[in-house]
Image (cartoon, helix red, strand yellow):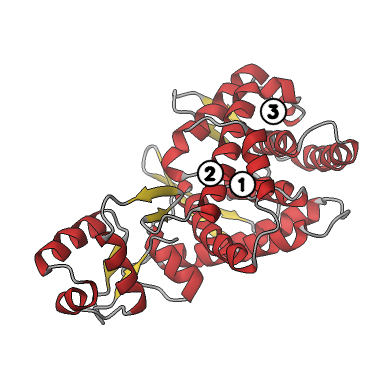
Amino acid sequence: MKYLNVKKALAAWQDLQPLSGKDKERLRRRFTVDFNYNSNHIEGNTLTYGQTEILLLFGKVIGEADVRDVQEMTASNVGLRMMTEEAVVKGMPLTQNFIRTLHKTILREDYTVCRNLPGGIQTSYVIHAGQYKTRPNSVITRYGDRFEYASPEETPGLMGDLVDWYNAAEQEGNLSPVELAALFHYRYIRIHPFEDGNGRIARLMVNFILTRHDYPMIVVRSRKKSEYLEALHQADLEVGPVPSDGAHADIKDIRPFLKYFNALVATEVYNDVLFVSERNENVWWYDGERIAFRTPNYTKILNAMRTQPTLTLADMKEETGISVTAIQKLLDQLISKKYVERGEKDGSWRVFVTQ
C-alpha cells in the first residue's frame, strides 16, 4: 500500500470542490463497481470485475455466473444505496434497527448452511437475515489460532453499547471521522453480531460514517485482503482476546489497525483526486489502479470499442489507422489483463477500464 498523508489527501480533495455533475456521476459509477466487487470478493463471491460492472450498471449477466453470487452482488448494491441515502440525512442518530435492516437487505432471506463434521457426521443450521446470531461464532486465524467473538447472549447488549458510544462520540467530536470509522469497524468486528455478512456490514458502516462527515467513500481492495486482516490481527494482539474488551476498545488500543486505516483512506482519497483531475487521455483506471499506457494506440482501440462495440479487426484498422497485426498484439494485452473481453454470443466488445 502506498502510504500517504490523510490530511494532504483530504485537502487535495477539498480543493476540487464543488465537483461537476459529470464528475460526481463518474465517481459514483466507478465506486459502485469497485466497492461491491471488492467487498463481496473478499468473502468469496466469484463474479469477475467485468461481470460485476455489467450486472450493476446495465442489469445484465454475462458469461458463466453462479446464481447465488449474482443475487448477492445485486443485494449488496441495494444495501450500498440504502446506506448512502441514510448517511446523508444529517442529525439522525444511528440505531441497531438500521444495522439489522441493512443486514437483512444484503442477505435477502434466511438460508440453511450444511457442514460435514469429522467422522462423516453432517449438521446444518439456519442463517437468519437481519437477526443477531443464535450460535457462537469464531474464526481460525492465519496462524492457526481460534479467535472467539462475542457470545449470542452478550451480543444485543454490546451492540447497544456500540451504537450509544458512536452517537455520543459523533456529538462530542473528539475523534476525527477517520478515527471514528476505524474504531467503529474494529469494535463491530470484535462483536461479530451476525452469523454471516459481518465483514460486508463493517465495510458499509465505515462508508456510512465517512459519508455523514462529507468524506469520500473508500474501498478495501480484495487483492490486499491479507493487509486488511493482518492489521485487524495486530490490533487484536494489543487489545487481547476477551470479546467485551474488543467491543469497548479505545482508539489508542487499536494503533496497528488505525495506521492501516489512515493509509487506506489516504490512498483511496488520493486516487479519487487523480481520477477526477486526470487530463492525460492515455490514462485509464481499473479496480482502483491507475493504468498509464505507453502508446496512444491503446486509447484509440479502447475508444473505438466503446463507441462501436461490434467492430472487427478490419474495422478497427479503418477506424484507428493501426495495422491489424499491431491491433492483435494490443488486444492480446488488453484481454490478458481483463481490461476488455469479447462476448461469445454477439461478438461485441466490452470495455472494463474507465476514464
Q: Is residue 317 left or right of residue 334?
A: left
Judged from the image, the secondary structure of the residue bearing numbered disc 3 is helix
Q: CA distance from mark 1 to mark 2?
A: 8 Å
Pick whichever, 254 or 295, lies toward us: 295
**Amino acid at the residue labelled 2:** Val
Judged from the image, the secondary structure of the residue bearing numbered disc 2 is loop
Judged from the image, the secondary structure of the residue bearing numbered disc 1 is helix
Name which quarter of the figure residue 75 lies in.
bottom right
**Amino acid at the residue labelled 1:** Arg
The residue that disc 3 covers is: 243
Expressed as whole percent of the image width and height from the top left, the position of residue 207 reads 67, 49
Front label number (2 vs 3): 2
- Quadrant showing the C terminus: bottom left
Pick whichever, 243 or 44, lies toward us: 44
The residue that disc 2 covers is: 220
Residue at (36% x, 73% y) in the render: 306
Expressed as whole percent of the image width and height from the top left, the position of residue 301 reads 27, 67
Tag 1–tag 2 contact (CB < 8 Å): yes
Expressed as whole percent of the image width and height from the top left, the position of residue 124 reads 51, 52
Q: CA distance from mark 1 to mark 3?
A: 20 Å
Closer to the N terminus: mark 1 or mark 2? Answer: 1
> How many neighbours does mark 1 have within 10 angstroms: few (below 14), some (14-19), or many (20 or more)?
some
Name the residue furthest left.
Answer: 325
